[in-house]
Amino acid sequence: MSEALSDPGTRRHASSHFGRDHEFHLRGGENMDDGDELEGDEDTGEHNLDSDDAAQHVSIHQRRRTDGTRAKDGADAAENHIYQPGSIVRVLLENFVTYERAEFVPGAKLNMVIGPNGTGKSSLVCAICLGLGYPPNVLGRATTFSEFVKHGKEQAYVEVELQKRPRDARNFVIRLGINSDNNNRKFWLNGKESSHKEIKNLTETLRIQIDNLCQFLPQDKVAEFAGLNPVELLSKTLQAAAPVEMQVQQERLSSLFKSQREARQRAEAETSELQRKEALQQTLQADVEKLRERDVIKREKRIYENARVFRKYEDARLGFKKAKKQSKEMAKVLQQLQEKCAPALAAVDKKEKYRKKIEAAVKSRSAALRDAEGTADAALVKIDNIDSKSETLTGKANAELEGIQKTKQQIQKVRAHITMMEGSYKTPPKEFDAADWNQKIRDQEHRMRELDTEFGDIDDEIARLRHMGTPKVEEKRKLCFKLKDLNSQAGAKLQHLAKVHRDASRGWDWLRENMGEFEQEIFGPPMLSCSIKDERYSDLIQSFLSKNDFLCFITQTRADHKKLSQKLLKEMRLSVTIRTQNSPLESYRPHRPAERLSDFDLEGYAIDQLEGPAPVLAMLCENSRLHQAAVGLRDLSDDAFHRTIEAGLDDVAAGKYSYRTARRREYGPSAVSTRVSPVLKGQFWTDQVVDSEEKSGIERRIRELDEEIEEVKKTIEAKRESKREIDAAKGAIAEKTADLRKAKNQLQKEYTKWQGLPSRIDMEKKGLADLQAEIQNARTRKIAIEDEMDEVAVEKANAVLGHQQSIFAVREARRALFEATMYHIEAISEVAALKADTIEIQQRLDEGNKALDELAAKVDNSRKLAEKGVQEIQLLDFGGDDACKERAQQLALEYTVEEMDDELVTIRARLEVIQASNPHALVEYEQRQAEIGQLRRRKARLDGELEALDTRIQELRGEWEPRLDELMGKINDAFSYNFEQISCAGEVGVHRDDDFDKWAVEIKVKFRPGETLQQLDQHRQSGGERAVSTIFYLMSLQSMAQAPFRVVDEINQGMDPRNERMVHERMVEIACREHTSQYFLITPKLLSGLRYDEGMRVLCIASGPQMPVDGAAKLDTSKLAGLQRRYLARLRRAVAQG
């Protein structure tokens, strides 16, 4: 027995186990040597475990035997259970949770850890979990490592010894240290510091799965295990009981099925798109043929246009060669003529050169004359400037004189003004009392403010009355709208909606008022927006739909869905369904035309009998497949029923029944099941009678509101009359106040003016002195101006003399120019005489030069045309069509440009005649044809992928599924047998679904006679029944467990004594068999007289405020067992002696 301290007043002890024949075996502390296990007599010594020497603690595992078995003495020789590799041989705790120090030595099979609540049983579970490297969240308790350190301690240690494998030299001792300050942890493996990854690799190698609830079920995870959904339970079961390769195969199958599902969806989408595009191709065929014919004509037109370019270039090239030849011939003729006339022309040239020299002299002397005239003009300008200056000075002198005269007149006026003001000052105005006038004005303003206040009060009262009347008007408007609705079919629907789903009705009322806030139209519940074309089909169609289908709201964009959800679900807190529909109604097509349904005694599809907005109908197709749901008014015969199944009509409602067919494709075409249900009366699309009582109430309330609104209107009108009276009074006061202000301002102005006369007289006298000083200054300036005028007169005389000299120079330059001009006239006359003698020669030369220039221009023009033709030919695009190019070149040799123009006119006329309704049809056709080719290739590739996936799935499934069936069969046999032992029934199977990810464990149980097997879930069975089922399921895994040990903490909570006793007996029977894994059962209570097996070990935890300080020696329960055996022996002897 080992000891640990939880606090200064409480100590906890863990006794080791019950051995064979109910003998207690005790594992001592660090002072206990190998083999020192005590038997149930009174000769045992004391063993103190309360030591803080870390080195001694670490050395414990070094003093233990590591050959996989515990040391044995003669009394314990029967316990020869061999631990499975990975089983827990020993657990040591130091400063962990409530323990100061304790050591647990579990048995190789069933270990029952018992003790009152709060003694630390679950702490052992926590120590196993953390010591093997798993995080705290597996436990469902604390979230940080530091929370497991004992209060007041800095560090905690957990040591877990695991049984070695046959090939290993020693057991695996994993030591965990936790630091409370920084929440750090550290691992040691066999005395050497190790990483967390190495610990995890070791536990995975030993198949330890602490995070699998089928292996490790702590107290706080019991409810979670009971709440595992069947899919998760299958995964956990395989992890706990199946080989690793089966788990790998399951994951591979899940991946393959997912890939198959995605590939099938892509293939279906590609097929649908291919059919759509091929149908579109058919509609374009006529236009395409016309466009192809136009293309042929266009090609011919392009050939003629290109041939025209070739012909124009050829014409230009030949014209260039001809013009160039003519130009050379003309140049040769002109050169011969020039050589023949050279002597006569030389005399003309000589005389012409003389004329040019004389002409140059004329130009030079003309320039000299211009210079002389310029100098004379400049002298004249100087004289003019001096005259202007003289005139300016004269003007200034006159201005000063006029200024003196005006100043004298101003002095006279100022003196008269001064005399007048001095007279006015001697006569004062009437007395002005400003305070009296201000008081009169304030009195009127005060009265005005009183009227304004009264006016504002009336406005406030009118506003209050309007505010009071507005809700009444709004209420009346809504009631009128509601009354109108009641009298209409739409109103009857709204009334029915309010009865069947209040939240949907409130949401629709809000949406109608706020429809403009959304990007696109939001559609209300189909119950309102849709209707049945033929009421005979109403119940049939409604049998396909759920309640949410009738009451949901439909948006067309994600943004609208988000906004509507925010308003209705979060702000208004309404319980409504909102769906988004993006696909158009046209995309939902039945697999079989409606006309062919008559072959099955059916009239059509459900969607064809509905009227409503297209997005709403599309939503019903998307969610309830109404476009595939067939309806008929007559009951189906057996033959028609079987034909509908063979035809793939899975949803049918006919006559009084609806038929829902489910198919399991993986089991072949014969794996079909059909659920037949009676067609019930529809609850949503029904004819509603107007509620007359509600209608009368609305009309009565409207009349009451009319009276109340009329009373408010009368009160408002009376208040408005009061406002008009106040307005009149305010106008009179405003007029009187204006008159008072005007009179006051007039008197104040006159008094202020009289007070300012002395200062104004002083200012006028000062101005008089300034005017007198100004007269003196003006006289001084006039004298200075007259002196300057004398200097200007002298300057003008000098300028006149200079101008006279420049006139003499102009006369001399004109004489020289006249002389040169005469010589120039003579030269011109002589040149003209010589040219007259050679005029015919010159004319012939001029004509030759002109002809030569014309030919040169013609050559240049022909060259440009030819070059342009080359450029046009280079720009021709034949699109790689050599035949088109050759044809154009041939036509260029056969036809002229004019003939080709005529042919082009004919071709254009043919193009005008042939027109297609869609000019882009050919482009669309060819583009779509390419897309169809791509789609066919992609579909073929997808078909190949699907075929390969099917093959791989069948191969892998053929290998995995039989192994799964075998495994689940063993679990079912054990599970059923366990329930039979307690006179109940249970079975375990596998639920197979088309979706492999939905394969699940299906557990069915029966606890009472007369019941049928029912699915195990959190609602049908009680807590005790679920606990029994859970432990039996875990026990069913025992013989197949891949894990070396399993832990279940307080699974018997909630069981009645009968169930607990039966479960315990089955657990002992199963867990204590040979070749089973180690099992830990944690419980705070046990019933008396339970079954015991020699393979069991019972670990008892004692707790209390008076625990012995010196360790386990004074709390040896084996002594108590010995005393009990001796007492029972004496009792039996006494009874026998009688």
Image (cartoon, rainbow, N blue to C red):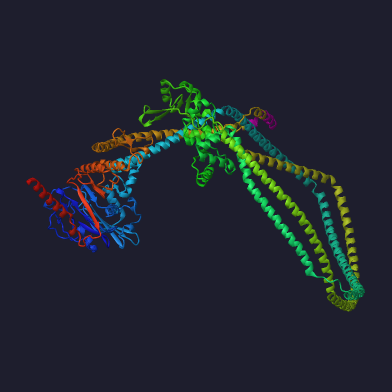
Q: Position of residue 623 (x, y in %)?
A: 47, 35
Q: Is residue 255 magenta?
A: no
Taking 991 as reference, is 1067 left or right?
left
Question: In the rendered image of this protein, does residue 771 appear above or below residue 152?
Answer: below
Q: Position of residue 1 (x, y in %)?
A: 20, 56
Quadrant housing residue 427:
bottom right
Q: Is residue 796 visible?
A: no
Q: Is residue 745 visible?
A: yes
Residue at point 83% right, 65% down? Answer: 743
Q: Which residues are magenta?
A: 889-906
Taking 826 as reference, is 105 left or right?
left
Quadrant housing residue 739:
bottom right
Q: Position of residue 289 (x, y in %)?
A: 58, 27
Q: Main secondary structure of the magenta part?
A: helix
Taking 955 as reference, is 64 left or right?
left
Q: Position of residue 728 (x, y in %)?
A: 77, 54
Number of numbered discs: 0
Nearer the observer, 400 or 37: 37
Question: In the rendered image of this protein, does residue 794 appear above or below residue 953?
Answer: below
Nearer the observer, 887 or 526: 526
Residue at point 15% right, 57% down? Answer: 34
Nearer the observer, 231 or 669: 231
Taking 709 as reference, is 1029 left or right?
left
- Most extreme residue toward the left, as rendered? 1137
